[in-house]
Image (cartoon, rainbow, N blue to C red):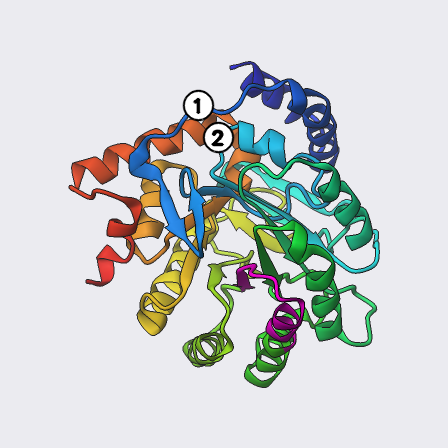
Amino acid sequence: MLMDAGASLLRRLPAEAAHRATLRLLGVAGPLMPAPEPDDPLLSVSAMGLSFPNPLGLAAGFDKDAEVPDAMRKLGFGFVECGTVTPRPQPGNPGPRLFRLVEDGAVINRMGFNNRGMAAMAARLKRRARRGIVGINIGANKDTADRPADYRAGFAALAPLADYVTVNISSPNTPGLRGLQNRDELARLLELVTGERARMNVHVPVLLKIAPDIDANALDDIARVTLASGIEGLILTNTTIARPAMLKSPHRGESGGLSGKPLFQPSTAILKAMRARTGSSLVLVGVGGISSGADAYAKIRAGATLVQLYSAMALEGPGLIARIKRELCALLTRDGFASVAAAAGADLR
């Protein structure tokens, strides 16, 4: 209750100022927060060689520099993804660059991979005790001459400190980045990353995060490349550059990636389409527009083994996490599923 009251006060600040203040508060309060309540065993998930207490994760973008992963775990997330982090520090795009679309249950951001760089993140991660599942989302610097090399460098620096690594090639806020989703570029990129993993002899799962703004042919190519690459999974999806006609907020015309409720249907459609193409060969993480247990359940039935959220928590407060888990338990029980894994992909069977 206290955390939600604080979140309500923070929402009176401009969006990015509220975000910075939240990170500072969590940095102070995190060590004093109690361990999270044990989750219902029904929610436990085994995937990629990892044991998740529940399938609900914090999506990348909230904790870009791995400042508060343990505080976020204590709020009840089953796993936390930090980043996106780039090899060199960069300030990101000029502000204002983060906008709440309250009327639409949505957010638009054009942050541009603002972060303090992989060396600073690595130093911070080395100081923390390894508790819970923390993934690292890696990207390329905006001005780099060789983007695949940036991903290899990021993996090399951070994989030993992570429970999994996400290769993010789908942000709309770094010009040209989404071109790495093209078949040949993607094959080269994943070959570099998996080659680095083999060279280092580290057994860290690799996931690929893709955009929702792609057609069936692109999905075919991504499915073929990822299945052949040896990576463990896909995160579906990042934010969208589309602007649905039903948006009401005065911020609806801002450029950047749209997340939140308007992203739910298109991201879930991509998730279901990719599950149909990959079967059970890859772990699929559903993200985009989750704001209830029913939303999380729909992602799972569409093919997700794990799910992530961020925008809804920013708009509604951290009490949302426990509510989603309660609602998800009730839905799994109602439909006779003994586990999250049993429900995964049910709508395709």
**Range shown magenta:** 192-210
Residue 76 got which mark?
Answer: 2
Query: As drawn, is 229 to the left or to the right of 16?
Result: left
Q: Secondary structure at mark 1?
A: loop
- Name the spot of residue 288 as percent of width and height, x first: 47, 50
The residue mark sitting in front, 2 or 1, is 1
Instruction: Give the mark, 2 or 1, whose residue is nearer the N terminus.
Output: 1
- x 61%, y 33%: residue: 70
Toward the front, the furthest residue is: 201
Q: Are marks 2 and 1 in contact (CB under 8 Å)?
A: yes
Residue under pointer 1: 37
The front one of 79 and 113 is 79
Q: Amino acid at mark 2?
A: Gly
- Mark 2 packing: few (<14 Cα in 10 Å), some, or many (20+)? many
Q: Quadrant of the C terminus?
A: bottom left
Q: Secondary structure at mark 2?
A: loop
Q: Amino acid at mark 1?
A: Glu
- Residue 77 shows up from this direction: yes
Depicted 51 relative to depicted 324: above or below? below
The front one of 91 and 258 is 91
Toward the top, the furthest residue is: 2
Depicted 338 relative to depicted 230: above or below? above
- Label 2, label 1: how far apart the Cα atoms are: 7 Å
Q: Is residue 199 magenta?
A: yes
Query: As drawn, is 50 to the left or to the right of 98?
Result: left
Depicted 155 relative to depicted 136: above or below? below
Residue 89 got which mark?
Answer: none
The front one of 127 and 81 is 127
